Image: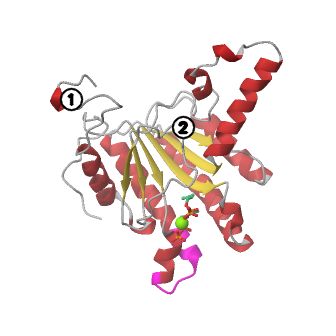
């Protein structure tokens, strides 16, 4: 992948660079089948794209990068494919964690532990713990994640406080709901990119993406990297974020 022009200098964020980019990494299976390869080969190459994308995001000065790696619905896939995806996550954490830590990257995980093998739960927890004090890019891995489950768990937690008499229903605020989501302390994504041309959210960050700009890249995830990331950011820069108000060009104040 060649360098493209909108890159700012290392770790100096330009106002045009989104603070938080979230990516639905899609198209691994199609990339492989177009080449007559097994789907796993697409996932394996997708891990290379992820490495390229993390580096590019760091260099751009992006503060938060979230990637959708395994959805709560991906359990519907054949067991062999699920096993391969779990193996790739293991490989990623084992191979890359020390390097990411040395680069001051903070790792956060969102999703539930249900169904995951204990060694994967431990790997993810250890990665979070090891990098907790890092101050560079925050890299959020959505693994075994589904937005409806995340919101349901937040609602249950609020309901428990109400039932215990700690909270009145009338006191519940949007901030309280947000504070019980996996993303507590992380700003909402400015830009959500989905690769492979599909145009849906597939249960990803439904609360947090309320005012995100959505960019649907035609690039299949194994072909994604710096160039495609820059193209998506360029598209984002053309957008007029109004948040329900009026355009800045028309005197709006957002
Ligand atoms: C994305 O690629 C990887 C995961 C969802 C885990 P896919 O495996 O969904 O690839 P397509 O959509 O079948 O091409
Ligand atoms: C979304 O992709 C989940 C991830 C990228 C991890 P899918 O390929 O699973 O989504 P659908 O099934 O096409 O909606
Ligand atoms: Mg897919």
Task: Give the crowd class for mark 2: few <14, some 14-19, many >=20 residues within 10 Å.
Answer: some
Dividing the picture into quadrants, the one containing residue 239 is top left
What secondary structure predominates along the stretch shown in magenta? helix
Dividing the picture into quadrants, the one containing residue 168 is top right
**Residue depicted at x 35% and y 50%:** 56
Badge 2 is on which residue? 207
Q: Position of residue 66 (x, y in %)?
A: 49, 45
Q: Position of residue 185 (x, y in %)?
A: 54, 27
Q: CA distance from mark 2 to mark 1?
A: 25 Å
Bounds of the magenta segment = 34-44
Q: Earlier in the sequence, mark 2 or mark 1?
A: 2
- Using the image, determine if residue 44 lies above or below residue 51: below
In this picture, residue 140 sits left or right of residue 242: right
- Using the image, determine if residue 37 lies above or below residue 57: below
Q: Position of residue 116 (x, y in %)?
A: 75, 53
For residue 42: magenta?
yes
Badge 1 is on which residue? 248
Q: Nearer the viewer, residue 105 or 17?
A: 17
Task: Give the crowd class for mark 1: few <14, some 14-19, many >=20 residues within 10 Å.
Answer: few
Q: Farthest residue in the bottom direction?
A: 36
């Amino acid at each position: 992948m060649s360098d493209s022009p909108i890159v700012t200098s290392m770790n100096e964020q330009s106002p045009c660079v989104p603070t938080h980019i979230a990516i639905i990494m899609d198209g691994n299976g199609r990339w492989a089948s177009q080449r007559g390869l097994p789907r796993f080969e697409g996932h394996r190459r997708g891990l290379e794209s992820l490495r390229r994308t993390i580096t590019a995001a760091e260099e751009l000065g992006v503060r938060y990068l979230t990637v959708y790696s395994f959805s709560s619905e991906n359990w519907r896939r054949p067991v062999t494919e699920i096993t391969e995806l779990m193996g790739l996550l293991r490989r990623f954490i084992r191979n890359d964690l020390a390097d990411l830590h040395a680069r001051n990257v903070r790792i956060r995980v969102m999703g539930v532990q249900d169904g995951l093998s204990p060694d994967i739960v431990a790997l993810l927890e250890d990665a979070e713990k090891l990098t907790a004090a890092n101050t560079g890019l925050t890299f959020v891995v959505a693994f075994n994640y589904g937005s409806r489950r995340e919101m349901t768990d937040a609602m249950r937690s609020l309901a428990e406080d109400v039932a215990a008499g700690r909270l009145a229903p009338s006191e519940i605020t949007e901030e309280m709901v947000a504070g019980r989501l996996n993303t507590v302390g992380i700003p909402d994504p400015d830009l959500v990119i989905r690769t492979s041309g599909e145009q849906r959210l597939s249960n990803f960050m439904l609360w947090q993406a309320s005012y995100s700009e959505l960019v649907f890249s035609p690039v299949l995830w194994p072909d994604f990297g710096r160039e495609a990331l820059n193209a998506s950011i360029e598209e984002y820069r053309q957008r007029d974020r109004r948040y329900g108000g009026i355009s800045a060009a028309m005197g709006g104040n957002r």
